[in-house]
């Protein structure tokens, strides 16, 4: 093993890859580290020493003031509630649709699936106006219900889960049917537990996307009591000024839930990537 390790490190190409990965990691972490540094400084200190990343003194008041400068707690709860509801509903609905496309024998299944996949090819902006018209006609504009309604479907989620369900051996379904299981029982008791890695991956992607969503809440949520955290943080940036300390402190706090969710699902996420392409 030691000889193999040494031979790896002796290869110039291997060392080059490692150096590129380190450089990429530093470039990726750069904005995050700058965000944390700025959140611990006053605006005076920031503009006085913009290239000094280490604050002369830690200014923790930004993390206190951000809760009172805007209704941060209300925005945080709104965002958390909407993100969790949409993530759970998308995982359930997309998994059911994906299982039907992968395992059930229904007429025109491939044609319908291709129609669903057009959702991946069309930018949301192309259907934004008709979607808004439908929500308004239903009387759901400026409600959390209307916002949740437009997020129930994900072409990416259906595609991801369908690919996993297709990798499950059909013998499992046949054996379950012999034991008297219905299709719903096969889906809920067999397919869903086995798909935990793919479900976790999809849930992490959905949670991250919905937590960071800015445009849809901007369009559909008008009342201040309904707004999400991303809309609330915009209050620190006006036409002529920007409170960098408070904005970065709020952004750091807004990042914590995404980090926690990823750490909780990291094991399943890695397992899903590792098993990609494996069948049966």
Image (tube, rainbow, N blue to C red):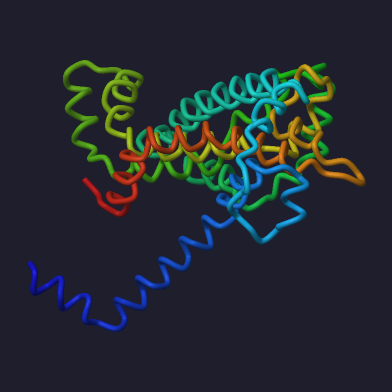
Query: Image point 56% across, 57% down: which residue?
Result: 30
Q: Residue 4's image quarter?
A: bottom left
In front: 98, or 160? Answer: 160
Q: Position of residue 68 (x, y in %)?
A: 74, 21
Q: Position of residue 144 (x, y in %)?
A: 71, 19
Q: Quadrant of the C terminus?
A: top left
Q: Position of residue 24 (x, y in %)?
A: 48, 65
Vertically, is 108 above or below 178? below
Can residue 156 be seen at all in this image of the molecule?
A: yes
Q: Is residue 25 left or right of residue 59?
A: left
Residue farthest to the bottom, as pictured:
12
Vertically, is 52 above or below 58? below
Q: Quadrant of the N terminus?
A: bottom left
Q: Position of residue 106 (x, y in %)?
A: 43, 34
Q: Residue 129's image quarter?
A: top right
Q: Is residue 172 left or right of residue 123?
A: left
Q: Residue 248's image quarter?
A: top right
Q: How many marks?
A: 0
Can residue 105 be seen at all in this image of the molecule?
A: no
In front: 212, or 163? Answer: 212
Q: Is residue 244 left or right of residue 267?
A: right
In front: 4, or 193? Answer: 4
Vertically, is 172 above or below 181? below
Residue farthest to the front, as pictured:
56
Query: Image point 91% across, 44% down: which residue?
Result: 239
Q: Is residue 198 left or right of residue 170?
A: right
């Amino acid at each position: 093993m030691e000889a193999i390790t040494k031979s790896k490190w002796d290869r110039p190409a291997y060392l080059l890859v490692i150096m590129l990965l380190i450089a990429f990691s530093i470039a990726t972490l750069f904005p995050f580290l700058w965000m944390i540094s700025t959140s611990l400084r006053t605006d005076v200190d920031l503009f006085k020493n913009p290239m000094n990343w280490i604050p002369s003194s830690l200014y923790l008041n930004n993390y206190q003031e951000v809760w009172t400068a805007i209704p941060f707690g209300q925005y945080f709860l709104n965002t958390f509630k909407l993100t969790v509801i949409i993530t759970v509903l998308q995982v359930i609905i997309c998994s059911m649709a994906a299982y039907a496309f992968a395992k059930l024998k229904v007429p025109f299944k491939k044609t319908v699936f291709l129609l669903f996949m057009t959702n991946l090819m069309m930018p949301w902006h192309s259907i934004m106006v008709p979607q808004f018209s439908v929500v308004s006609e239903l009387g759901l504009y400026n409600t959390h219900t209307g916002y949740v309604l437009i997020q129930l479907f994900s072409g990416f989620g259906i595609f991801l889960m369908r690919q996993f369900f297709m990798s499950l051996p059909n013998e499992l379904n046949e054996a379950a049917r012999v034991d008297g299981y219905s299709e719903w029982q096969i889906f809920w008791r067999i397919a869903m537990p086995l798909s935990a890695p793919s479900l976790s991956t999809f849930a992490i992607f959905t949670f991250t996307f919905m937590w960071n969503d800015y445009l849809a809440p901007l369009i559909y949520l008008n009342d201040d009591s309904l707004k999400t955290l991303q809309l609330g943080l915009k209050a620190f940036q006006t036409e002529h000024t920007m409170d960098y300390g408070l904005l970065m402190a709020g952004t750091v706090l807004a990042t914590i839930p995404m980090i926690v969710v990823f750490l909780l699902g990291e094991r399943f996420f890695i397992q899903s990537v590792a098993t990609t392409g494996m069948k049966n």
